[in-house]
Image (cartoon, helix red, strand yellow):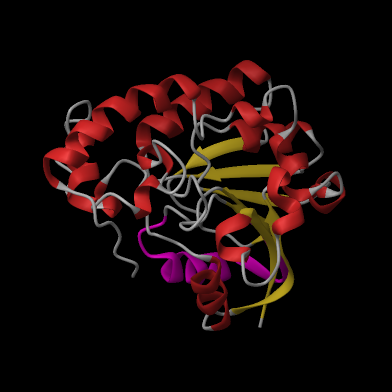
Amino acid sequence: MIRTGFVGGPLADHLLRRLGERAARVGYCDGSAYRGRSKLEVLFGPDIWARITGKIVVDFGCGLGGEAIEMARGGAARVIGVDVVERSLVAARRAASEAGVADHCSFRSWVDEQVDVVVSVDGFEHFGDPMEVLRVMRRIVKPTGRVLISFGPTWLHPLGGHLFSVFPWAHLIFTERALLRWRSGFKHDGATRFEEVEGGLNQMTIRRFRRLVAESPFVLETFEAVPIRRLRTLANPLTREFLTGSVRCSLVPR
């Protein structure tokens, strides 16, 4: 596991207070990049609809259910949204009812059947035990099924610290203790490690993800490290960990 940061103490506290206010105004990682567009199409490409049409689909880590509802509207025979946060499931059920898809779009904390497709959006940088997640996915996907994964930013991305990225790569400069101390000024859940914050941050890198898949019950069918658009000309194997905007791939059972 990567351990980060070398700036701590009063200097870090001062800088984070000042820079944190600016980051909140800028809106890093606030989802605005998908405004007015289908997040599923942006992440997986327009052929996502052909891949789910007529299929039973699990949205693994569905959150408030936006992508699950979109897939239900987009041709999936049935969509099951799965999440461990009960308040998110309650909100997702309400949203599905308002969208008129509750008859074939449900939300729960478990899956007790095998499905055609498992979709995971922006989960693998958060899961506390990503290997166990892969094992669960293998149990619920049919032998002929697919797992479609997209996630990012990864840990070495300029904004890979999510909330903690008050400027690019800030999470690699300030100590974990300083960042959590700054966060405690407006979040009062007692988190003292990155993995303890709401949603969790597991410091997932591209290299670690590929190693996890290699040791899992899946093989990579496709894999793409999508460069940050503005830095695409600088993207190469040496800069990949630092300049990848998102990872997308499909997995098939071994």
Instruction: From the viewer's side, name the closer residue of 201 and 220.
Output: 201
Can the viewer see residue 198 in this picture? yes
Residue at 12% across, 45% down: 9
Judged left or right of residue 167, residue 13 is left
The correct choice, above or below, for 160 with respect to 20 in the image is below
Count of numbered marks: 0
Q: Pick the quarter of the image with the C terminus.
A: bottom right
Instruction: From the viewer's side, name the closer residue of 23 and 208.
Output: 23
Residue 130 included in the magenta stretch of the image: yes
Can the viewer see residue 140 in this picture? no
For the record, the magenta segment spans 127-149
Judged left or right of residue 41, residue 50 is right
Instruction: From the viewer's side, name the closer residue of 135 and 188.
Output: 188
Residue at 57% across, 82% down: 214
Q: Pick the quarter of the image with the N terminus.
A: bottom left
Q: Position of residue 48 (x, y in %)?
A: 80, 48
Q: Position of residue 151 (x, y in %)?
A: 58, 52
Q: Position of residue 184 (x, y in %)?
A: 17, 34
Q: Position of residue 43 (x, y in %)?
A: 71, 46
Residue extending farthest to the front is 11
